[in-house]
Amino acid sequence: MGIGENLVLKCRWSQCIFVDNKIFPRHNDMICLCVLSYLCADNQQEVAVSCHRDDTELPSYQLVTNGTSFDILLTDTIMTNKNMIRRDYIIIRRIVRNDYPSKTTLLQYLSDHDIEIDSRTFDRDMNSIRYNLDVNIAYDRTEGGYYIQRLNNDDFDKLLFFIGLAENADMILSSMRDKQELLKYLSISPTTSFKGVEQIAVLLQAIRNTLIVRFRHLNYSTKEQTEYTVEPYLLKEFEGRWYLFAFVRKKIAFRTFGLDRLETLTITDDKFQRTEGLAATADRFNDVFGLTYMPNQQNPPVETVQFQCNSDFMIGHFSALPLHHSQEIDGNTVALQVIVNPELENKLLSYGEYINVLSPASLRNSIRERLTKTIRQYGD
């Protein structure tokens, strides 16, 4: 952006904003301003935002970098809101320790991160967390501190994940000017893919607001692109890549789409009905390792998969890197509550002689047969 150039944002009921043809989630005006602050991080000029409303149009915002005045001028608001979002995540990170930190403790924790705010600002931040981030923070008078209500283990893990994303994004953005210096210290696997992750927030909003999405999906094998209009139900991460699980109304079936293969993603204003039956189908992905659970299977059962580890090293490995959220370890035995599928079988096979699959019998027998065929291939 050059000095004097205008950047216009149009807000839509799809809870997204479009900035220079790029799409961003729009929880509220604060997020709009935060996005703008990142886009203008390299611009040393004063940044201002104006808001125009009337009875016929949706709200629009205009960013100007030449100091021009507007009807409603929010000079310096951008950086203020960016800092507020950072404070919100730091507060959450401290509260999830579950030791009921007091306001004094939280203010000191912020100070330890070079953030100094007064009591009134802290109260506003707490309200921001409750209403903008949808995190239900309450005060326990007996303990004399704050805690997060109604947060199960799965939600806790997801919350920490997004806190980590926010912190890492802030670190990356603050390091952009030094990127050439930093790149020589970075090594990335050739299979690592970051493409498509910028669409996570947008798709989450579409899922939450039951909005139909459209995109072109690239087939890596044929290089052909197919147009899809889908009802999004779930985002799933597997082995470092993100996937959208969505219902394709024309095919009357669910499909899984890699986010790195999506092009021209559009969030429409058209809503869909999230039925209990389809939602239950999507929820069954929580019982799957990988991506190959097919909803047209006749109610595949959740089974107890048990295997023994032949070394303390492997027990340490599975303790640090669980295969599934249901994983439990008892001595040298690991147990999972999952729907057995080919990806799980292949994963267990990859550990070779270091584990011994005990149950279910069908899985144990299948692995034995595949190992027997492998031995024959290497026979003299």
Image: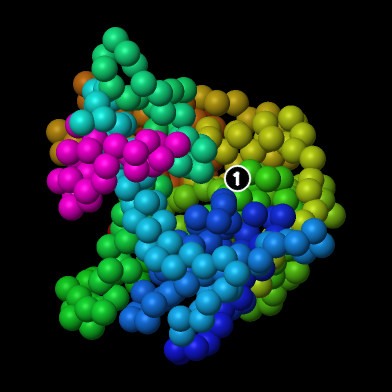
What residue appears at the point 82 percent right and 51 percent down from the top-left corner?
A: 249
* Viewer-proximal residue among 233 and 377: 233
* Camera-nearest residue between 12 and 167: 12
Quadrant of image for the C terminus: bottom left
Of the residues shown, which amino acid type is indicated by label 1? Leu
Look at the picture and state if 160 lies above or below 204.
above
Q: Which residue is mark 1?
A: 234
Q: In this rendering, does residue 6 appear at all?
A: yes
In magenta, the rendered stretch is: 105-127
Magenta span has 113?
yes
Residue 252 location (% of width, % of height): 82, 47
- Position of 262 compared to 334: left or right? right
Q: Residue at x 28, y 69 (%)?
A: 174
Q: Position of residue 33 (x, y in %)?
A: 49, 63
Q: Residue 318: horizontal and vertical position, in percent?
A: 27, 37
Q: Is residue 4 magenta?
A: no
Query: Which image quarter: residue 367?
Result: top left
